[in-house]
Image (spheres, rainbow, N blue to C red):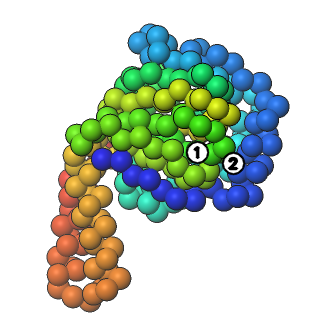
């Protein structure tokens, strides 16, 4: 299951982010890839030593982490700071699965949930293709929108055919390790929210809310 979230970043934030990235130092994306992914990865990433990371993260991280749709879908426990990637004409990232464990030795985390935030939309090609049980879904969202999906998904970035693609990519370890349990909790949580809005004092709402809370308590890794 995947989730598209609209307007994670607003137009003012996007303008500042794109300005910062315009003259930033980017390096070969293979430097951050695992052995298998490096064979199919052809992009550029903001140098991890760049001082711009702090400015960028101050805008991007709160916008995502405080978004209720992200919280209710990902159940984030540990969230890594973003990688900022650039794809110019001809660049691509072939089908791969994200590394299961990332981070330095003193800050390792399991990758359960992946997020791509689109920082611009003035390019051709470059769709994010994700293999699901319903076939391959290709996404190219508006600037400021995000797509969130299980890190276990086989996915790729199609070749950019014109222009430049800019994205922020973020991984999270979820409180709910099992992707099916996350999906069930998300669906139940959506139903619970509707009931709270429409029938807050009903017995049915209380029952659904109780079941949701106890499943979250039972399945969470805290």
Q: Residue at x 41, y 12 (%)?
A: 36
- Image: 38 above or below 91: above
Q: Is residue 222 left or right of residue 108?
A: left
Q: Quadrant of residue 165 in the image?
A: top right
Q: Is residue 210 left or right of residue 117?
A: left
Q: Secondary structure at mark 1?
A: strand
Question: Quick check: can you spot residue 156?
Answer: yes
On the image, numbered disc 2 is attached to which residue? 58
Q: Nearer the viewer, residue 161 or 22?
A: 161
- Image: 193 above or below 129: below
Q: Earlier in the sequence, mark 2 or mark 1?
A: 2
- Residues at marks 2 and 1, CA–CA distance in whole angstroms: 17 Å
Q: Secondary structure at mark 2?
A: helix
Residue 104 location in percent, x, y? 53, 22
Q: Is residue 66 left or right of residue 46?
A: left
Q: Residue at x 62, y 45 (%)?
A: 121
Residue 118: mark in rendering: 1
Mark 1 Cα-neighbour bin, 10 Å: few <14, some 14–19, many ≥20: many
Q: Nearer the viewer, residue 150 or 51?
A: 150
Question: Quick check: can you spot residue 173?
Answer: no
Mark 2 or mark 1: which is in front?
A: 1
């Amino acid at each position: 299951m995947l989730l598209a979230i609209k307007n994670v970043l607003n137009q003012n934030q996007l303008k500042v982010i794109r300005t910062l990235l315009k003259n930033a130092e980017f390096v070969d994306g293979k430097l951050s890839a695992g052995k298998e992914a490096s064979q199919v990865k052809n992009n550029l990433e903001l140098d991890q030593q760049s001082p711009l990371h702090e400015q960028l993260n101050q805008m991007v991280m709160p916008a995502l982490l405080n978004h209720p749709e992200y919280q209710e879908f990902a159940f984030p426990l540990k969230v890594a700071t973003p990688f900022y990637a650039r794809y110019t004409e001809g660049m691509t990232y072939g089908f791969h699965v994200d590394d299961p464990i990332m981070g330095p030795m003193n800050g390792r985390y399991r990758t359960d949930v992946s997020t791509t935030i689109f920082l611009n939309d003035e390019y051709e090609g470059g769709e994010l293709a994700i293999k699901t049980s319903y076939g391959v879904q290709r996404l190219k969202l508006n600037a400021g929108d995000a797509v969130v999906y299980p890190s276990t998904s086989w996915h790729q970035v199609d070749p950019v055919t014109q222009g430049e693609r800019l994205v922020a990519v973020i991984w999270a370890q979820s409180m709910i390790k099992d992707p099916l349990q996350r999906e069930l909790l998300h669906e139940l949580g959506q139903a619970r929210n509707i009931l709270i809005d429409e029938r807050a004092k009903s017995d049915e709402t209380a029952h659904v809310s109780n079941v949701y809370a106890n499943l979250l308590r039972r399945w969470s890794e805290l």
